Image (tube, rainbow, N blue to C red):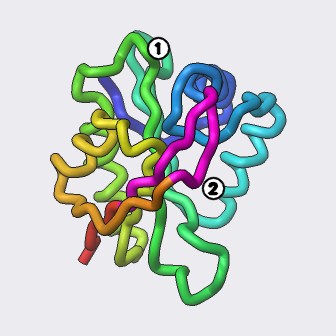
Amino acid sequence: MLIRSVKPDDYAAICDIYSYYVLNGTGSFEEISPSLTEMTGRIETLLDNGFPFLVAQHDQAVVGYAYAGPHKARSAYRFTVEDSIYVSPEAAGTGLGKRLLKQLIVEAKMLGFKQMMAVIGDSENAGSVGLHRSVGFREIGIAKQLGYKFDRWLDIVYMQYSLE
């Protein structure tokens, strides 16, 4: 398994992986899958602004990705990033998410960021909460019923990791 920086040739696979979770999961509060054009714009905006974006490649196929983006838009938040990690359904439960998150933490530190936030959709998302906890994130709160998807109310779990 190779973990490397994203390339334009990866965008379609990233879009497919994310679309699966938009349509089938509660980790993302999006309800309509973004188009490849939209996803390309999102990725390039992150890269243009100096944020790390990694992919996991296995047998020439992208099977997961992780990136850090702005936690909030205001300038005072410029040293705080928010992580996102998605792995293909076939790679779920293999430890790939943990490898991606660990490397993302390394990259964010090297870029001078000081804090990393996890904003996890669905308080029942034990996989994501457990993943973040396993690398040292601490839970700082749960906001109740912020999203409504698949005919149910969903919470947000906030977790934090010091990059210092």
* Neighbours of disc 1 within 10 Å: few (<14), some (14-19), many (20+): few
Specify start and end residues of the magenta stretch as a single range: 145-158
**What SS does tag 1 mark?**
loop
Between 81 and 150, the residue placed more toward the observer is 150
Specify whether residue 104 is in view. yes
Q: Majority secondary structure of the magenta segment? A: strand
Residue 137 lies in quadrant: bottom left
Q: Residue at x 63, y 55 (%)?
A: 47
Residue 124 locus on image (x, y percent): 36, 37
Count of labels in the image: 2
**Quadrant position of the C terminus in the picture:** bottom left
Q: Residue at x 55, y 26 (%)?
A: 21
Say what amino acid the circle numbered 1 marks: Gln
Residue 61 locus on image (x, y percent): 49, 15
Q: Residue at x 76, y 30 (%)?
A: 32
Q: Which mark is residue 60?
A: 1
Question: Mark 2 = which residue?
Answer: 47
Say what amino acid the circle numbered 2 marks: Leu
Distance (Cα) linking label 2 and label 1: 22 Å
